[in-house]
Amino acid sequence: MPKRSLEVCGYKGCGEAAQYIIEVDGKSLPLCKDHYRSILKRIEARAADAGTATLDQLSLIEGEEGAFSLISRREKKV
């Protein structure tokens, strides 16, 4: 992933000021308030369904110029 300022939200298509930094797949990801809340809601929903959830259950999709997206990893069905 190309270098990108930790002061600006790195979520694809967003240019808001970063207020949070999370770590996913060993990378520091700056997030604005709205994208941070969005990720929290997804994790909370998964925890409500499965009983637990962590940031490790998100996959980092790297884009151009250091932008990224996060998607939920699907659980393996046995």
Image (spheres, rainbow, N blue to C red):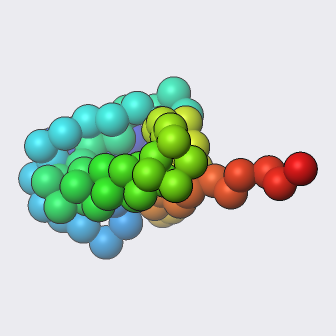
Percent x, y for residue 44? 37, 50
Say above or below: 58 vs 20.
below
Side of 4 where 60 appears, left or right:
right
Q: Nearer the viewer, residue 64 or 59?
A: 59
| Extreme residue in the bottom direction | 13
Q: Nearer the viewer, residue 72 or 12?
A: 72
Say above or below: 58 vs 26.
below
Say above or below: 1 vs 56.
below
The residue shown at (27%, 43%) is: 30
The residue shown at (71%, 52%) is: 75
Side of 12 where 50 appears, left or right:
right
Percent x, y for residue 47? 46, 46
**Does any portion of residue 11 appear in the rendered image?**
yes
Percent x, y for residue 12? 37, 66
Q: Nearer the viewer, residue 9 or 55?
A: 55
Percent x, y for residue 61? 56, 56
